[in-house]
Image (cartoon, helix red, strand yellow):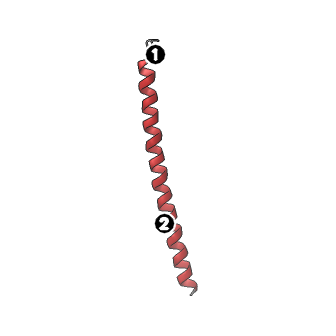
Amino acid sequence: MKRVISLLLLGLFSTAMLSGCNTMAGAGKDMQKAGEKVEDKAGDCSDGKC
């Protein structure tokens, strides 16, 4: 019985870790796109006429 519970907990932990990695990867992509927009705006304003 202890083995079944241990395997169940290991499976739940693994699932949580994998979904956490996907969430962080998605957040990283969102931050990258936001940074690109800031860079584009900074390039547009480089002549001082924003």
Whole-percent x, y for residue 28 in the image: 47, 44
Observer-nearest of 29 and 49 = 49
Task: Kindly indicate whether the residue at mark 2 contacts the one at mark 1 (C-beta within 8 angstroms).
Answer: no
Q: Is residue 2 above or below residue 26?
A: below
Q: How many marks?
A: 2
Whole-percent x, y for residue 35 in the image: 46, 33
User: What is the residue that sits farthest to the front in this orientation?
Assistant: 50
Image point 42% across, 32% down: which residue? Answer: 36
Q: Which amino acid type is shown beneath numbered disc 2?
A: Thr
Left or right: 34, with 6 as reference point:
left
User: What is the residue that sits farthest to the right in this orientation?
Assistant: 2
Q: Which amino acid type is shown beneath numbered disc 1?
A: Cys
For disc 1, the marked residue is 50
Image point 50% across, 67% down: which residue? Answer: 14
- The N terminus: image quadrant: bottom right
User: What is the residue that sits farthest to the top in this orientation?
Assistant: 48
For disc 2, the marked residue is 15
Whole-percent x, y for residue 24 in the image: 49, 50
Image point 52% across, 70% down: which residue? Answer: 12
**Front tag of 1 and 2:** 1
